[in-house]
Image (tube, rainbow, N blue to C red):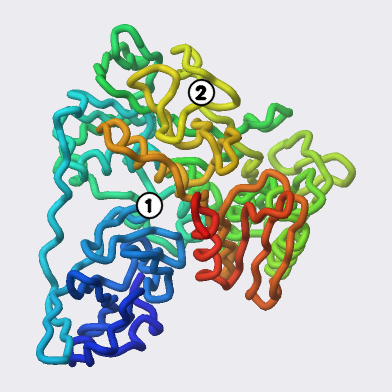
Amino acid sequence: MGATQAQLSGPDFSLGLPLADVPATGALSGHVGGEPVLLMRRADGLFAVSGACTHYGGPLGEGLVVGDTVRCPWHHACFDLRSGEALAAPAFDALDRWAVETVGDQVFVHARMAPAPARAADASAHPARIVIVGGGAAGFSAAEMLRRRGYAGALTLLSADAAPPCDRPNLSKDYLAGTAPEDWIPLKPDAFYADHAIDLRLGVEAARIDVSGRAVVSTAGERFAWDALLLATGAEPIRLAGPGFDRPEVHLLRSLADARAIIAAVEGVRTVAVVGASFIGLEVAASLRERGLEVDVVAPDTLPLERVMGPDIGRFIQGLHEARGVRFHLGRSVETWDGARLTASGGPPIEADLVVLGVGVRPRTALAEAADLTIDRGVVVDRALRTSVPGIFAAGDIARYPGADGALVRIEHWVAAERQGQVAALAMLGEESELTDPPFFWSQHYDVTIRYVGHATDWDEARLDGSLEGHDATVRYLKAGRLVAAASVGRDRENLEIGAALRPGAG
């Protein structure tokens, strides 16, 4: 995705501008040779970096500058404005740096510079062998961060998937809709793993953890020795047990293979029933409508997403889908499917040539349970992602850690999992790091994106500001008078500002 026109509306830095125009705080947005650039002044000099986020190309000039960092307004990736380093996922690649020259009272930005050298790491306390179980968000981000921080030991990434780590949020969005090519989906090209000496083992299922022998044993009996171990086994979609839901025309969506299977299955199909009004279910509904299929959504909820985001957003999202032709069957629980008709409580059968289930997931904690790690609706960890067994860490959908108020939380969000993997990686290397960012996720429905920051399992008040129908609104969720989360449509910077306010010690 390229730079937006808004990014190119500032000054052309290559032509020069008065030094006095460069602010003492924040960053100035402009461009060089048609490319967006951010320029900032600090006590030790002037610095310039690319103004396009390396994740999806978001306009950093419209983001939030805090100290020497900038956060992307689209998906909240965080970068160092001096070095360009991607400090927090979902971006992993650094921003380009640009050379800055001062001539008299004029400032010129005119040439790209070599990447900033990696920060020196003290390798004396590094474990000799690290094994990561799970090739999802947390597992990949941990492996990438380990090598970025100079870890030189043996690094093995075990993944039960057949495909390398991929951009899973896109599977239910643009990729399923047919608007994103498959080469957008891998998080990194195959060569990345060889170039960084990451021993990526695909199609390898971990059977057990030999804690005393410090090894992971695969279902094939292969042993992978470790001095530090990260469990990032993620979650698995829930299947329904009723008659007919074991048929091959019933699909789940979790992996690239699942998305490929749905895309292949909808060829020649007219009607699809999506069971569950979850984020995944509704994104699938939107994507399949984009492909021209007739889509019915069946769920026991009274409003879609009401439990997570309240009635205002629930009604808005339902209306958005209905305007595109999606039919809702709410307040109904599915019972059977015979390959052509889906039966559900409280109404007539629903025609369906194909069924996609989006009824939730369960954390994959079996390995951790068998290894006698502390379990409480997830694998219990501290804010550095350390489990109850020394040397073993857990991150992603399985991890249950102290939230903002100290109570244990388990977050099933992609960006949260990536950032947990990064924190776990630093902790394995003996660096001081812990979770501080509030959880963040985004959900796309046609041309509307909802951005959500914070965590609220329940709230006393959902305060709507603005117009959802006008795509210009924020809903703030308060508990005991305290802001705990917010969902925004068309207010990306405001969502960033709320995220900053929710960080420990802010304001």
Disc 2 element: loop
Q: Position of residue 481 (x, y in %)?
A: 72, 54
Position of 148 compared to 270: left or right?
left
Inter-mark Cα distance, 1 to 2: 24 Å
What residue sits right under mark 2 in the picture?
365
Residue 296 can be seen in this image: no
Check the image and report above or below for 19 versus 36: below
Q: Position of residue 80 (x, y in %)?
A: 28, 61
What residue sits right under mark 1 in the picture?
89
Q: Nearest the camera: 321 or 229?
A: 229
Position of 155 compared to 204: left or right?
left
Which residue sits at x=54%, y=55%?
502
Check the image and report above or below for 62 versus 30: above
| Earlier residue among tags 1 and 2 | 1
Q: Nearest the camera: 121 or 224?
A: 121
The quadrant in which residue 144 appears is top left
| Quadrant in the picture for the N terminus | bottom left
The quadrant in which residue 468 appears is bottom right
Residue 324 can be seen in this image: yes
Check the image and report above or below for 504 versus 198: below
- Residue 122, disc: none
Report the amino acid beneath label 2. Answer: Thr
